[in-house]
């Protein structure tokens, strides 16, 4: 693998604000794989999983030629989450199997470790990590990063983003090259109210690049003391399910930056991934080369039309 998504592979039961309930939707770090694989063939996942994973999702792995080398089978059931969306765009979730509510026990048991990364990181160029503030995990990732010279994108978890965690987050960023966070998380973490205040705080972080996601408006690409707004793409079809737009767009930004694209192009490619992610429940099923060609052409067109000056590369 050249690129890997590190996190929990999840099945979701989704309850939307309008009352719709959709069962058995692939989610979690599957969206991270999507964001990587849409743009680069040599991409897959590092995770713990249940023995039922192949039964439910083997066809998706086969269709997209996804390696299973980073998957460690640990239990009978892959994590199954109940996700209930709120009107403000936030959500409540819990882990269930059958009629039993596991809380986060099953989720934690299947969370990948640094040792899981070490098993398969020989050819890794970029890791997209969705993880909390476990110091041991991050310090071990730091050791692997130093010895294998890969880049790390960290998509921080919502529950971490409270002011009392700020010092721990700043400490964790020493192991991180690229950072991804959304608007509500940033407001909560820094105790600010406006996008302008959020941008100022994020520019103070000691990372090469930050993907600052602001919902259906789009995102900001931040590098050093500069930022660029990249608006969300619009289309005429139905928005079926926005779940995973943050996960998938974050992973795409990692690929873009590792492949030498500038911060503006990284933001454009990230938005394009989200643009295709909303069209169905779960990740895109067939991540074909034809689809990639279509997405690449769109990215080049949008980058050529972007009004700002060329952005510096993040290396």
Image (spheres, rainbow, N blue to C red):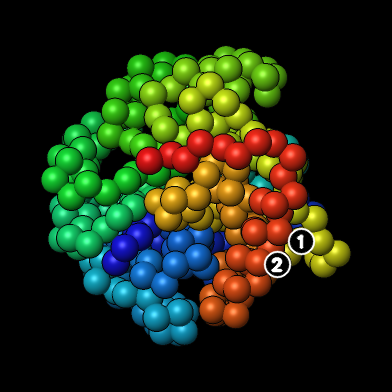
**Whole-percent x, y for residue 37 in the image:** 46, 67
How crowded pointer 1 is (Cα within 10 Å; few <14, some 14-19, many 20+) is rated as some
Image quadrant where one finds the C terminus: top left
Task: Say what secondary structure mark 1 lies in.
Answer: loop
Q: Is residue 86 above or below residue 207?
A: below
Between residue 10 and residue 118, name the one nearer to us: 118
Q: Check the image and name the residue furthest to the front.
A: 309
Task: Say what secondary structure mark 2 lies in.
Answer: loop
- Residue 138 in view, yes or no: yes
Q: Report the residue at 69% width, 36% height from top.
A: 308
- In the drawing, does residue 267 fall left or right of residue 210? right
- In the drawing, does residue 42 fall left or right of residue 199? left
- Residue 11 in view, yes or no: no
**Whole-percent x, y for residue 62 in the image:** 41, 84
**Whole-percent x, y for residue 205 in the image:** 43, 22
Are the residues flagged by discs 1 and 2 in contact, CB closer than 8 Å? Answer: yes
Q: Report the residue at 53% width, 18% height from top.
A: 201
The Cα atoms of the two marked residues, 1 and 2, are separated by 6 Å
**Whole-percent x, y for residue 93 in the image:** 53, 48
Mark 1 lies on residue: 239
Mark 2 lies on residue: 279
Q: Is residue 184 above or below residue 47?
A: above
- In the drawing, does residue 152 fall left or right of residue 63? left
Image quadrant where one finds the N terminus: bottom left
Q: Report the residue at 60% width, 80% height from top.
A: 290
Q: Report the residue at 51% width, 60% height from top.
A: 35
């Amino acid at each position: 693998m050249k690129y890997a998504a590190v996190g929990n592979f999840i099945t979701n039961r989704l309850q939307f604000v309008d009352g719709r309930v959709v069962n058995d939707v692939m989610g979690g770090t599957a969206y991270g794989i999507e964001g990587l694989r849409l743009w680069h063939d040599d991409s897959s996942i590092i995770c713990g999983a249940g023995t039922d994973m192949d039964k439910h999702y083997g066809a998706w792995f086969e269709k997209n030629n996804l390696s299973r080398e980073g998957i460690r089978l640990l239990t009978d059931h892959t994590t199954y989450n109940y996700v209930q969306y709120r009107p403000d765009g936030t959500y409540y979730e819990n882990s269930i199997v059958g009629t039993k509510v596991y809380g986060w026990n099953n989720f934690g048991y299947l969370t990948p470790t640094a040792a899981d990364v070490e098993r398969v990181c020989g050819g890794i160029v970029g890791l997209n990590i969705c993880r909390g503030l476990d110091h041991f995990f991050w310090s071990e990732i730091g050791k692997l990063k130093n010895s294998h010279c890969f880049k790390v994108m960290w998509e921080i978890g919502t529950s971490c983003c409270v002011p009392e965690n700020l010092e721990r987050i700043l400490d964790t960023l020493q192991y991180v090259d690229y950072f991804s966070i959304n608007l509500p998380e940033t407001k909560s973490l820094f105790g600010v109210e406006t996008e302008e205040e959020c941008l100022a705080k994020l520019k103070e972080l000691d990372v090469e690049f930050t993907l600052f996601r602001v919902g259906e408006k789009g995102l900001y690409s931040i590098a050093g003391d500069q930022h660029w707004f990249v608006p969300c793409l619009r289309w005429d079809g139905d928005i079926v399910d926005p779940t995973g737009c943050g996960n998938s767009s974050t992973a795409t930004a990692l690929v873009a930056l590792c492949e030498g694209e500038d911060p503006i192009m990284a933001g454009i490619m990230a938005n394009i991934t989200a643009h295709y992610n909303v069209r169905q429940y779960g990740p895109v099923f067939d991540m074909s080369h034809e689809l990639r060609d279509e997405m690449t052409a769109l990215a080049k067109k949008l980058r050529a039309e972007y009004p700002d000056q060329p952005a510096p590369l993040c290396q």
